[in-house]
Amino acid sequence: MRNIFDQYTQPENRLTHALVSVLGEDITLLRQFVKWVTRKPIPKNIKIIEQQLPGEIEITEEESERRGLPDAWIFDDESWSLLIESKISSPLKTDQLRRHYNTAQKRGYEDALVLAIDVVQPTRKLPDYVVFRTWSDIYIWLSQNTHKSDWAIKALRYMEILEAKLTNDGYLNEGTLTVFSGIPFTEDNPYNYPEAKRLIKLAMEDLRSRKALVKQLGMNPKGTGRGAITGKDGVAVWDFLRLKGSKDTETFTKFPHLTMGIGQERLLVIVTVPHSIKPEFRKNIVNLGFEGFEDLMYQVNKNLTKALRKAKGAAPWVDVVQRRYPSQRSMAIIDARVEYDLRTAFPRTKQQPVKTQPQWLMATYDALSNKRSNLQVAVGAIFPYRRCEKTQSPEILDYVEATWLACKPLIDMMIKGKY
């Protein structure tokens, strides 16, 4: 069914229409919006119109584009006004903002401001009469007002739906409309590919800014992840962060990396030891012998158990998989897989209720030592949606970060400070 806000062709116009509609329906929300944007006293009687000038009748989208009208106009009965110009894919133009301001002046609105909205911060200094906000700023502001207005909730949901569609269509290549607010997949709201793709983009953008990952693990915040996230028929969407030393021009499977996957039933957070990792990195692990490998994983398990203590339902995890691909675009064929809670490798305690079965860890070391196939080993944690309530909150990204940091001994042993 078509969304009530989908009244225009251009995404910018759709999004502005949604914002204008909710502000027009809720005068209290409109006044709060103006106060938030301008940081100034609010006129008593204010109105909002879309793609037209005060006193004129509403015109078509095409006519508005031809005449270069502002996307929306908030004004009072005297000389105050706030004009809105919004963008998503095309850049803000100072000349256009100036024309809007001059139009307001000519029509007697001497106390005028222009609100410019875009997905990213402008690269040039804007005129003094321009106030700038990103769409994600507006998303956060709406989130803070959901307890006051049902219309704010409607706008939030529409921003999420539109962002998922634009991301899936490749329209939103830079910046975001929203911010990561948790993984909403439940029995009542099951996993879907466009939403998972939107969430992974938001999550990775946040995680790239984490200074602890840069300082402690050598994460490269400017390194490229997946060039194109595909696989809409799969059961998960994933992306990764590179470590320093892993060049963008180099196949990422030659270097350990930080992987996050949003699946149908769980969030997977791992340090990946890929199948074609540089031989020296694999040898650094294999040369420890099993006892040395066991000691290394004991420390990782200890770190993970501590990091996940407050994330009830999460578990330290190891995933060993052998797979092959009939072609570059095809789904992987899994020939063998062993997944297990890392706590199975060590003695059971009151704080660690999982029963001991160390053979799983032995099998992992044996597979690494005698590698003859397309074999990948990954160590980290799982966060099942049903059991771990933290997945529903933006706080889950703190646990993603903590999981990767807990795996530092493994990363350090592989690369041994060479990068």
Image: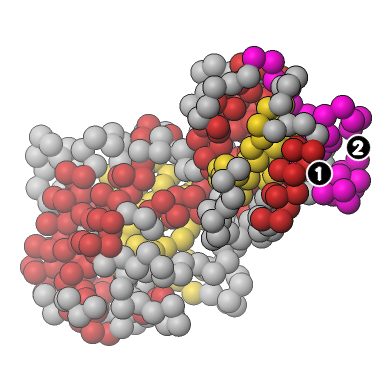
The location of residue 263, given as percent across then percent down, is: 48, 49
Give the vertical position of 178 relative to 124 (above or below).
Answer: above
Give the vertical position of 311 relative to 298 (above or below).
Answer: above
Compare residues 234 and 373 and report the one nearer the observer: 234
The structure residue drawn at horizontal position 22% and vertical position 68%, both measured from the top left corner, is: 411
Q: What amino acid does circle 2 point to?
A: Ile
Q: Is residue 222 left or right of residue 68?
A: left
Provide the secondary structure element on which disc 1 rests: loop
The location of residue 340, given as percent across then percent down, is: 29, 53
The location of residue 72, given as percent across then percent down, is: 74, 36
CB under 8 Å between discs 1 and 2: yes
Q: Is residue 418 left or right of residue 75?
A: left
Foreground tag (1 vs 2): 1
Quarter of the figure that contains the C terminus = bottom left
Q: Is residue 354 visible?
A: yes
The location of residue 32, given as percent across then percent down, is: 56, 22
Residue 55 part of the magenta segment: yes
Give the vertical position of 33 relative to 269 (above or below).
Answer: above
* Image: magenta residue range: 44-72
Q: What amino acid does circle 1 point to?
A: Leu
Q: Which mark is residue 69?
A: 1
Query: Furthest-bottom residue in view?
Result: 279
Provide the secondary structure element on which disc 2 rests: loop
Q: Residue 74 appears in which quarter of the rendering?
A: top right
Q: Residue 395 appears in which quarter of the rendering?
A: top left
Of labels 1 and 2, earlier in sequence is: 2
Circle 2 residue: 59
